[in-house]
Image (cartoon, helix red, strand yellow):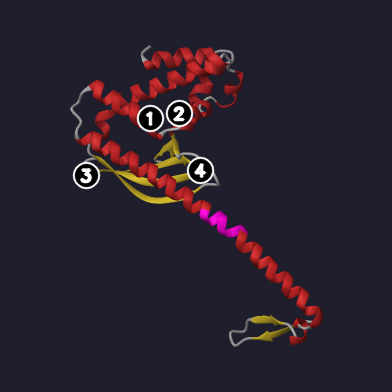
Amino acid sequence: MTPSRVLRNDRSTITTWPKTSFVGAGILPRFVLGISLFLAAVMTLPLSARADEQIQSANRIIDSMILDIEGYLISDGNDIESRTQITKHILDSYFDLPSIARFSVGPYWRSANSAEKAEFNRVVRQVMIRTIVRNFDQLIGLKFSQTETVSKGDKMVLVRGNFIDVKGVRPPISVAWRVVTPPGGEARVLDIELENISMLVTQKQENIAVIRKNGGKFSALIAVMKQQAGK
């Protein structure tokens, strides 16, 4: 059958098929079309549901973490030990520390032996704790205001927002939490972007520079990290 084109009032055209094309042999194309539409619906719905699940999971963990942090800041007594315990709880509860450590050294992770990997994981955690505790005062008076949540593939979600000074003294700081959302697993924060600068990528660049400067020795990076951790 040959299709015909009809000129519409808005000067655009549409393609029409003779009615006989849906009779007899025309049943097959219509059947195939129906199957195609069904398969498209079946394939699209789970993907959409998965994206919604990812976003909800990421929002939940960020909301929970922010509530924890705000609660701690309200009751903060400027006590180093208390701040250290709070920081340990936040990192262990909400962050994917093993993945952060692994990603922060790029291809050099494969060159490390089991003992070096275990030691590096431990030292990275210590450095993060010490850094946060040392800058704890900067968190006081800040509130997080979420702006959007975007799915990035099937295992990652970006939760964007701003840190706002409740007293209006400091300008807002844009922040994006990069959250890992594995199917069937717990959501965890992998990275933080401040003013569009990835903290993890920045750390990775610094770590790789240290390793290369020391002839590719992974142990050299561990030694530097221990100094930063105060060990």
User: Bounds of the magenta span?
Assistant: 43-49
Of the numbered discs 2 and 1, the one sitting upstream in the chain is 1
Label 3 belongs to which residue?
Answer: 168
Please state the horizontal and vertical placement of residue 94, each as a whole percent of the image.
Answer: 39, 35
Asked which secondary structure carries label 2, the reply is helix
- Secondary structure at badge 1 equals helix
User: Does the rendering let one see residue 159?
Assistant: no
Residue 112: x %, y % from top left: 58, 17
Magenta segment: does it hold 47? yes
In whole angstroms, how far apart are the C-alphas of marks 2 and 1? 7 Å
82 w.r.t. 220: above or below: below
Q: Of marks 3 and 1, which one's residue comes earlier in the chain? A: 1
- The residue beneath circle 1 is 91
Q: Which residue is mark 4?
A: 156
Q: Which residue type does callout 1 highlight?
A: Leu
Q: Identity of the amino acid at label 4?
A: Met
- Image disc number at residue 97: 2
Task: Please name the amino acid that badge 3 sits on.
Answer: Gly
